[in-house]
Image: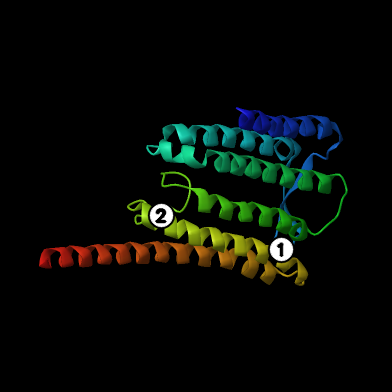
Amino acid sequence: MKFVWVALLIIILGFAIGIYLYPSMPEVMASHWNASGNVDGYMPKFWALFLMPIINLALLGLFYVIPKIDPLKHNIKKFKGYYERFVLLVMGFLLYLYLVATSWSLGARFNFIFVLMPALAVLFFYVGVLLEKTKRNWFIGIRTPWTMSSDKVWKKTHDIGGKLFKIYAVLLLLSLLLPNTDYVFIFVIIVPIIVIVIALFAYSYYEYKKIAKNKRKRKSKNKRR
């Protein structure tokens, strides 16, 4: 239950900040930044201040229920600690974005992409750690028809996936050395994640077919004997 109490503390902190800042905030607050790191979206201050805590509350409910309703819940128990730390990291990441957005409305000025990258890098690096620890289940991990059909395919795909996401996290940090343009956002954040998803989908199919082929060979050898 320690995990739940820490998650609730993050949620309460978000609501407390919103309540404290509400009287001093403008009626309309910055809520969205474009690929260049410039503000291009606004929302009423109530939603700007309280949407994140509400989302975190909903996420806690969802993440808390998932291990209880998964048909393979016994597998989730095997990496429960990693899963709970991932949940807290996601909620902490959203709180971080919330603090960044509210600080802008308080007068701070910065490049949003620059402050976003380190947080994204930490989040995706831990995604890599989590993938390497997951066991086959219906909600968490790389779920393709082939990973869900074989524990071996699941493990091999997630081992590769974990390494790719860790490399991706390092790439995000290194991107801070590049000049800030829309292309950095597209080619450092968007393109690599698409490539990783497609590669893992294809890899799981390849491993499944390879294992199936080896099984057929062994059966053929046994028949000859």
Q: Which residue is mark 2?
A: 154
Q: Where residue 84 appears, x then y in whole percent?
A: 58, 39
Q: Which residue is mark 1?
A: 173
Q: For label 1, count other residues whose C-alpha is less than 10 Å away and answer few (under 14), some (14-19) or many (20+).
A: some
Residue in view at x 77 percent, y 60 percent: 114
Image-quadrant location for residue 176: bottom right
**Judging from the image, what secondary structure is the residue with disc 2 in?**
helix
Q: Where residue 45 appears, x then y in whole percent?
A: 76, 38
Q: Residue 20 versus residue 10: which sits nearer the camera?
A: 10
Residue in view at x 64 percent, y 61 percent: 169
Q: Where residue 91 appears, x then y in whole percent?
A: 65, 41
Q: Residue 112 versus residue 28: which sits nearer the camera?
A: 112
Query: Is residue 95 left or right of 207 when viewed as pictured?
Result: right
The quadrant in which the C terminus is found is bottom left
Mark 2 vs mark 1: give the one in front. 2
Image-quadrant location for residue 35: bottom right
Q: For residue 111, say whether it is visible.
A: yes
Q: For residue 192, which numbered disc appears in the image? A: none
Q: In terms of sequence position, does the residue under pointer 2 or pointer 1 come before the other?
A: 2
Query: Is residue 61 left or right of 75 when viewed as pictured?
Result: right
**Judging from the image, what secondary structure is the residue with disc 1 in?**
helix
Label 2 sits on what residue type? Answer: Trp
Q: Where residue 147 appears, x then y in whole percent?
A: 38, 55
